[in-house]
Image (tube, rainbow, N blue to C red):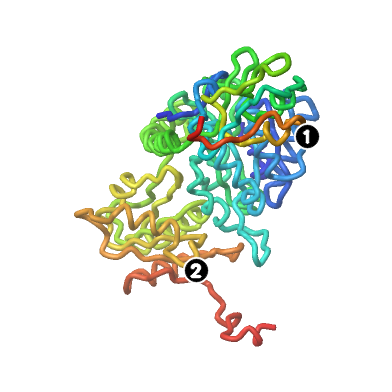
Amino acid sequence: MRELLEGSMAVAKIVQLCKPGVVSAYPITPQTHIVEELAQIVADGHLDAQFVNVESEHSAASVVLGASAAGVRSYTATSSQGLLLMAEVVFNIAGMRLPVVMTTAVRSISAPINIWNDHQDAVSLRDAGWIQLHAEDIQEAVDLHLIAYKLAENKSIMLPVMVCMDGFLLTHGMETVNIPTQEEVDKFLPPYKAPYKLDVENPMTLGPLVDPESYMEARYALNETHKEALEFIPKLAADFSKAFGRTYNGLIEGYQLKDAERVIVAMGSTCGTIKEVVDELRKKGKKVGLLKVTCLRPFPANAIYEALKSIPKVAVVDRALSVGSFAPLLADIKAAFFGKAKRPKTISSFILGLGGRDITKDSIKEIFRLMVVKERQGEFIDLKPELLKDNYEDTL
Amino acid sequence: MFGPLTCKSGSSRKNKTGPWRTESRPKFLKKNCIACNMCLLACPEACISGQGKNNYDFDPDYCKGCGICARLCPKQDIEMIKEECQ
């Protein structure tokens, strides 16, 4: 049924339909509306789940770790500092191969404290072992949650999945969303039967100490499973398309790539703005396009190589930094082309939209303009030079 | 793909920690023992067994040589000796 919904409400609805047995979260802007709504849904008796109120995100993550280890489908959501506070447990959930699904309402990281949207929180945890999916709009955020549970709980995958949606832009934006019925969801996502769990009838330890004799194998297996997930995700996305009629590749999405001479690579809601600009410029006869990266981890290097190998000029847009090095998405994209016979002549790097700085159509047009001249190295768009001083005294 | 992920109960029996001992091991003198059970209860490896006076001993397959038993014994009836002079 199509409804006009705030992004957070839409996510709460789809999580309700996925029937988690345990939900635990600590409120943080801009994630709060999602878990507020879920708490209400549970309190109203519309979802037979235990909603565990906790004193911190570290505890929220620990609760869903425990619930998942006991064989229960579980859900949490967080943002920014909350995700950082969870970090220790986030790595553990992946290492223990527990199919937790978490929504990250993607937000900047302090300091300076800032509650608005960029990708620094999720991107900083890209090495934690979670599958990380980035939504472009609210409908995709809804659909990715369904895909996330199905993916996470696959017996040969058994990995946690983080569904990232841009804070405020998607969590607080309104959109007409197609929410599937309970029957449709039940058909696509059967109840979770844990292949291993903590059970008093069959005692065992999950997450025990392993010495140097066996640690490497646990990490190797985690890494290999990410490679297997790369093969599996497009198949799952195809199953989803068949069941719900909305088409996803799950890894990447090309927009006007055929015959394109200039292509921007981006993640999240920025892709919607870029599509608008691409349409405008195409009308003027400019051969421009977009490559959206939905799946940041596992990183679909081959799919990206195939999509971009014949494009003359590529610009990668990062909304996060790897301070002191190349921007995170740029580094991955460049690595995908290293040593390959075919590659774009230039792969430019742009940083924009940090801490909620608006990304306008003009920002995108500026990138399409700048990437023509030469390869740009981590150039900031919409920067205000008047706020930058050489001496701290001048800033006081 | 999965690596080492879980372990069934009883795995500490398989995982012999005796080789962790580097310097010393306990020697149960069995002279003044009053069967207070302190050594048995305090052993972090639970590798001390026995019942009745002067009848306690440790299992070298699991003893890490921590010395807690010797320190706790109220009758100084356990002493730590160099690993090589058994």
Above/below status of A264 relative to A122:
below
Q: Nearer the viewer, residue A149 or A212?
A: A212
Q: Residue A309 vs residue B85: left or right? A: left
Along the viewing direction, whichever of A385 and A73 lies nearer the viewer: A73
Of residues A357 and B56, the one drawn nearer to the viewer in this rendering: B56
Helix, strand or loop at disc 2? Answer: helix
Residue A362 shows which numbered tag?
2
Badge 1 crowding class, 10 Å Cα cut-off, few under 14, some 14 to 19, many 20 or more, is some
Mark 2–mark 1 Cα distance, whole angstroms, equals 41 Å
Instruction: Tell me residue A112's x, y (percent).
Output: 66, 67
Q: Which residue is mark 1?
A: A40
What residue is rendered at 66% in x and 86% in y?
A: A393
Name the secondary structure under disc 1: helix
Q: Residue A235 location, x and y as percent? A: 39, 30
| Residue pictured at 49% horizontal, 70% vertical | A381
Residue A154 horizontal/vertical position (percent) = 47, 26
The subunit letter for the residue under badge 2 reads A
Residue A40 visible in the picture: yes
In the picture as drawn, the residue positioned furthest to the right comes out as: A43
Q: Number of labelled discs? A: 2
Mark 2 and mark 1 residues within 8 Å of each other at the beta carbon: no
Q: Chain of mark 1?
A: A
Q: Which residue corresponds to the image point at 51% horizontal and 65% vertical from the top-left?
A: A352
Measured as percent of width and height from the top left, residue A164 is found at 56, 46
Q: Are marks 2 and 1 on the same chain?
A: yes
Residue A230, visible in the rendered structure? no
Q: Residue furthest top?
A: A201
Q: Amino acid at mark 1?
A: Gln
